[in-house]
Image (cartoon, rainbow, N blue to C red):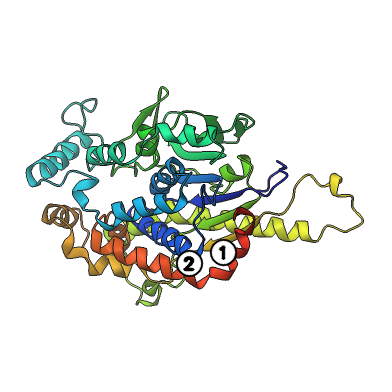
Amino acid sequence: MVTDQVSSKPSTALVLGGGGARAAYQVGVLKGLAEILPRKKGTYFPIISGTSAGSINAAALAADADNFHQGVAKLIDVWSNFEPHHVFRTASWGLMSRVARWGWTSVGFGNPEKGPHSLLDNAPLRDLLSNRIDFSRIQSQVDAGHLSALSVTACSYTSGRSTSFYAGTSDIRPWARVHRGGLADAINVEHLMASSSIPIVFPPILLNGEYFGDGSMRQNAPISPALHLGASKVLIVGLRVERDSEAQEPISYPTVGEIAGYIMDTLFLNSMYSDIERLERINLALDHVPESVPTDAVEFSPIEHAVISPSVDIAAIAEKHYENLPRTLRNLLRIIGMERETSRRFISYLMFEKGFCRELIECGRKDALEMENELLELLSDEY
């Protein structure tokens, strides 16, 4: 959880975790940063690490690493105009037919090799990413010195390992830890599709001879890739709401929707905050190393960091925009036992809808502005 890589200048990393449509909040934080920080040629984050939907935002920023404000503006444009059909197919007949075939295959009828292999078909997302991100620019930004590294994490269904694919400077070396590692690769749309492929909801993606799914699976140390890539300072944008109104509700038997929501929370949110806690404990321990101990005898150094998390109940916002989801998707959710009031946690991860996304963007923006002084201090070496 700490880095042993030494640089003459502190290198700042941006860490963007998973969360499906909740990642609109990350774009809001970036919007707030763009208002706080002066325009300059280049980026404020030489190292960018993304997982799941966070990998999409990370790759987009990396492709525009020579112009941070421009990259943020492009992300705002995409997320502010999102509709569900931009991410997955929502046509009535196609969606219901797919679900029916998937159900029959799951109980032993049909050919499992022919699929479908997931609840939803996210082919539209591949088209959107291919049209919006110039992946050839990522390595070009590294070569031009605007970017040190981009990391995109996905989990292999084949091996069970969490792999952080990275494009970066030649001095970065691959790493291997228990059930996780880093591998140099030319980042393309398939890496993003794999990293953001929510299990069961979206299909696995074939990469380098293995099938991969959402990077949040088995990613026990989501801050680690940034540190392996050389970061000594980290800005972490989390998506967990610290004060969840649902915790105040009377105890009752959990519904299918509530259970699904908690599963998604566990998949996307818990490991990030556990890793933050681990980082803070290690920093505290390093701060208590006696001054009499020579600095060259200590293998690691503290990691300066800041964490931004939503100040509002994202699930409640999702419930407010529920009727804006396609009727076919709402009907599908009802069929599998997910009602509006009890499945709002789960729905918030699939709410790729402009009204919902715009609210989260504004929330992220306000939260970033509230932390202006702390963020300016963290990024002081980058401007």
Task: Specify whether residue 300 is in view.
Answer: yes
- Quadrant the C terminus occupies: bottom right
Label number found at residue 219 = none
Is 319 on the left or on the right of 269, as rendered?
Answer: left
Residue behind mark 1: 375
Report if the CB atoms under discs 2 and 1 are less than 8 Å apart: yes
Q: Position of residue 151 (x, y in %)?
A: 50, 39
Relative to 67, does residue 121 appear above or below in the rendering? above
Q: Secondary structure at mark 2?
A: helix
Question: Real-space Cα distance between discs 2 and 1?
Answer: 8 Å
Q: Earlier in the sequence, mark 2 or mark 1?
A: 2
Quarter of the rendering containing residue 29? bottom left
**Which residue appears at 18% of the width and 40% of the height?**
103
Label number found at residue 368 = 2
Relative to 166, does residue 281 appear above or below in the rendering? below
Task: Specify whether residue 343 is in view.
Answer: no
Q: Determine crowd level at label 2: few under 14, some 14-19, many 20+ residues with C-alpha closer than 10 A.
A: many
